[in-house]
């Protein structure tokens, strides 16, 4: 008897429906899986046989052929176990076949018939609804994640017996229900840290406010203990809240990477990722034998924080250059190509020298001549060009630390950032992919960031003195436009331009000795 069931494969962050055809016929017992399966899929029949027998079902002692279509797409992983097992039960008459084709079924079986969580449940649920499936049956651990998709019955199951009872009209399996909008709005701004915790450092807060308002990349340079990491970790709390579309897109990426907890349905706050400096190129950018999103994609719509930037491998930093410009990373293999979104804010921090005290107001730098420049050269010029704001962080003095004066809350700073972003959204209204000044193309910079003769003269002197590149010229104009937006000014004034030039610390002549 021939039976069809439906599973799914995830490529990039999108899902492709896979048809599982199981045919049971007479002859000597023989099991075979065709359709370009990998080793994990080939091993599934052993898991299925044990799981069925453990739960009181039988594996037919006949010729069983399993075909996975389309046959030109490689099938990977163990999440087809439940799909194949359901087809085997239906083909052998142990469960009813009438409703089977209306559901997308997926999950990895344990030997006792229990189900292990899968990756990419949200992407699969979106594709299932698009293709008109009545429902989606998957492991209970992933049910909340998939249930945010409307107009699709999502059933979270704990073992294969629940699936068999469901198709036989037995049991009391109920669809998982999640109120997507309520889930989204209830935890929209639940951040653990706040800028009110930070004493002093008003100039650094100003720089991070500008970065948040325009989506600019920023690097913090200062001695150990000056507060670089503390400030960076609070940046997401002043970014505009995620839109529902951004939340869904971010959740899809985390779902594909298997980073969502069973209790989570949506990623409702902007991601903050802080990988260790020993990270490999593939872990940072994405890829691998079975491509997975890297840290830059897990930071999509949020912040990627690279602490101690010069300690990262140079090759790992250099592969970020293209994603920083294109806001997307493409992983190419011989037979397929996958795209992962990577629109993130880069925040980096570093000591000014190996000992950490170059340019310190009180402590003496112990580094020999030339070592400071050698240390800074670990970060390439092209990468620094892609960072809009270079901010010097100085230690906080005792009087500021001991002060009882309340610092400004993240909520107040966020309101100014949101107002500036609203100006930018109106400006880029005809281009829905653009929502921040940092994303402007060179041509748009020239059309939008126009400055008067006095501003041109100031910028000319700065470029000549600092030896700035053409890319740095564009960056200064983008930052100046953001400063003007924060001030509510339609034009870029001289003070806006001067402040933007001030944030090119690493370009200053003699900064590194």
Image (cartoon, rainbow, N blue to C red):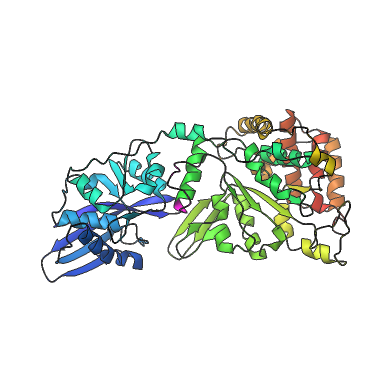
Q: Quadrant of the N terminus?
A: bottom left
Return the x and y of residue 156 as percentages of the image width and height: 32, 45
| Viewer-proximal residue among 110 and 372 | 110
| Viewer-proximal residue among 16 and 148 | 148
Return the x and y of residue 380 as percentages of the image width and height: 72, 60
Q: Which residues are magenta?
A: 256-267
Evaluate whether residue 188 shows in this view: yes
| Viewer-proximal residue among 114 and 411 | 114
- Is 226 placed above or below 282 here? above
- Is 48 placed above or below 99 here? below
Q: Quadrant of residue 58?
A: bottom left
Evaluate whether residue 440 shows in this view: no
Q: Quadrant of the C terminus?
A: bottom right
Return the x and y of residue 445 as percentages of the image width and height: 70, 41
Magenta region includes residue 265: yes
For the image, the number of numbered tags is 0
Residue most toward the bottom?
28
Return the x and y of residue 410 as percentages of the image width and height: 67, 35
Q: Residue at x 46, y 35 (%)?
A: 183
- Is 126 placed above or below 12 here? above
The majority secondary structure of the magenta stretch comes to loop
Q: Residue at x 26, y 66 (%)?
A: 46
Taking the image as shown, residue 130 lies to the left or right of residue 195, namely left
Magenta region includes residue 101: no
Q: Quadrant of residue 36?
A: bottom left
């Amino acid at each position: 008897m021939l039976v069809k069931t439906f599973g799914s494969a995830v490529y990039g962050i999108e899902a492709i429906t896979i048809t599982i055809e199981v045919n049971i016929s007479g002859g000597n017992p023989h099991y075979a899986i065709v359709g370009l399966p990998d080793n994990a899929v080939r091993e599934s029949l052993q898991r299925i046989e044990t799981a069925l027998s453990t739960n009181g079902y039988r594996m037919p002692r006949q010729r069983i052929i399993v075909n996975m279509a389309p046959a030109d797409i490689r099938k990977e992983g163990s999440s087809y176990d439940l799909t194949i097992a359901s087809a085997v039960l239906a083909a052998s008459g142990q469960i009813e076949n009438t409703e089977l084709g209306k559901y997308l079924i997926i999950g990895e079986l344990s030997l006792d018939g229990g189900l292990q969580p899968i990756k990419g449940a949200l992407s699969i649920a979106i594709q299932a609804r698009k293709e008109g499936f009545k429902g989606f049956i998957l492991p209970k651990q992933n049910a909340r994640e998939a249930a945010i998709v409307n107009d699709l019955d999502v059933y979270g199951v704990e073992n294969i017996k629940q699936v068999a009872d469901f198709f036989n009209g037995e049991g009391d399996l109920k669809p998982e229900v999640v109120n997507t909008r309520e889930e989204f709005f209830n935890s929209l701004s639940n951040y653990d840290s706040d800028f009110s915790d930070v004493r002093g450092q008003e100039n650094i807060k100003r720089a991070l406010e500008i970065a948040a308002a325009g989506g600019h990349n920023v690097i913090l340079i200062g001695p150990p203990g000056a507060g670089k990491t503390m400030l960076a970790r609070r940046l997401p709390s002043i970014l505009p809240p995620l839109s529902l579309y951004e939340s869904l897109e971010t959740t899809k990426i985390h779902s594909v990477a298997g980073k969502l907890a069973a209790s989570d349905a949506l990623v409702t706050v902007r991601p903050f990722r802080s990988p260790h400096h020993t990270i490999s190129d593939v872990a940072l950018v994405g890829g691998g034998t079975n491509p997975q999103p890297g840290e830059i994609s897990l930071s999509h719509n949020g912040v990627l924080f690279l602490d101690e930037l010069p300690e990262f491998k140079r090759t790992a930093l250099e592969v970020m250059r293209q994603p920083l410009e294109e806001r997307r990373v493409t992983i190419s293999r011989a037979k397929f190509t996958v795209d992962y979104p990577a629109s993130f804010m880069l925040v980096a921090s570093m000591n000014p020298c190996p000992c950490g005290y170059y340019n310190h107001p009180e402590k003496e730098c112990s580094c020999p001549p030339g070592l400071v420049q050698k240390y800074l050269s670990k970060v390439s010029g092209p990468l620094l060009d892609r960072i809009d704001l270079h901010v010097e962080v100085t230690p906080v003095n005792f009087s500021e630390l001991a002060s009882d004066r309340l610092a400004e809350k993240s909520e107040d700073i966020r309101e100014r950032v949101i107002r500036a972003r609203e100006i930018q959204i109106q400006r880029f209204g005809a281009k829905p992919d653009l929502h921040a000044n940092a994303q402007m193309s060179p041509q748009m910079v020239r059309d939008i960031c126009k400055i008067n003769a006095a501003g041109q003269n100031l910028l000319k002197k700065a470029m000549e003195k600092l030896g700035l590149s053409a890319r740095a010229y564009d960056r200064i104009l983008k930052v100046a436009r953001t400063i003007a937006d924060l001030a509510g000014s339609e034009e870029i004034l001289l003070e806006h331009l001067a402040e933007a030039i001030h944030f090119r610390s690493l370009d200053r002549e003699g900064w590194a000795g």
